[in-house]
Amino acid sequence: MDKNTDSNATHNLFKHQRAMLHDVMQMNITLEKIYVDREDEQLKNIAQLKEMRDREDEQLKKIAQLSEMKAKQKDFYLSEINSLTIHNKLLKSKLDFIYGENLEKKDINETINLEKELKSILEKVSHYKDTKTKELQSKVNQLEDSLNCIICSDQEKRIAFLPCRHKTHCISCFDKQPPETCPLCRGKIENSMVLY
Ligand SMILES: [Zn+2]
Ligand SMILES: [Zn+2]
């Protein structure tokens, strides 16, 4: 073999190997870039998934809080209903007692207590009735006074003075002694008229 030819062949082979090595390296760089990009994308996806899971966790927490609140409300209403039921039973037995229901089931002490309570209620009612009657009577008196003559307090006011139009006198008291000035406004009476 020729020594030159041999050296050339070696040189070519070497060159060829270097070119191949370069290609492989280039390919590696490209692949690495693709891998890095994919890794970035995957990291982004993982971050998004984590965010979604966090949101779901938060919603679940809110739902749990809501149901806890509802349970508490339910307990509250149930206890309200219970106390109202007890209250109703007490009122019912009190009413039964006052109305003398099931008297045959009461012993003598209970009957005496009932009598006492009814007497005290009757006293309260009587007192209230008396007070109210007095009030009404005094209102009736006031009304009658306002309708009756201020001189005799007996006959109805029937004379209107002019020009003030006030009424204070019945016909007979006015006829007996007609006033010159109105007793209410002190105005001069110029004329009078009889009201029917
Ligand atoms: Zn009169
Ligand atoms: Zn007058």
Image (cartoon, helix red, strand yellow):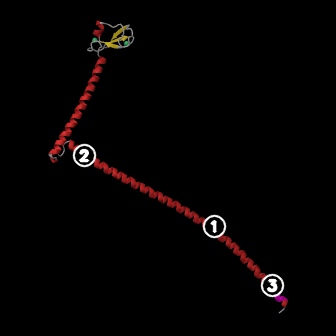
User: Any magenta on residue 5?
Assistant: yes
SS category of the residue bearing label 3:
helix
Residues packed near mark 1 inside 10 Å, few (<14), some (14 to 19) or many (20 plus): few
The image shows residue 180 at horizontal and vertical percentages of 35, 7
Q: How far from the left and from the top, in percent, is residue 63?
A: 46, 57
Tell me which residue sits at (16%, 48%) in the image.
105
Residue at image coords 32%, 13%? 168
Tell me the tag on residue 11. 3
Tell me the CA gap for discs 3 and 1: 43 Å
Give the CA separation, mark 2 to mark 1: 77 Å
| Residue range corresponding to the magenta coloring | 4-8
Q: Tag 2, which secondary structure? A: helix
Q: Secondary structure at mark 1?
A: helix
Q: Decide which of 4, 180 is in the foreground and name it.
A: 180
The dot on residue 92 is 2
**Mark 3: amino acid:** His
Give the class, few, some or many, for how many residues have Cα within 10 Å of label 2's Cα (few <14, many ≥20): few
Location of the N terminus by quadrant is bottom right
Q: Amino acid at mark 1?
A: Asp
> Tag 1 or tag 2, which sits nearer the N-term?
1
Q: To which quarter of the image does residue 111 belong?
A: top left
Q: Nearer the viewer, residue 57 or 16?
A: 57
Badge 2 amino acid: Lys
Q: Earlier in the sequence, mark 3 or mark 1?
A: 3
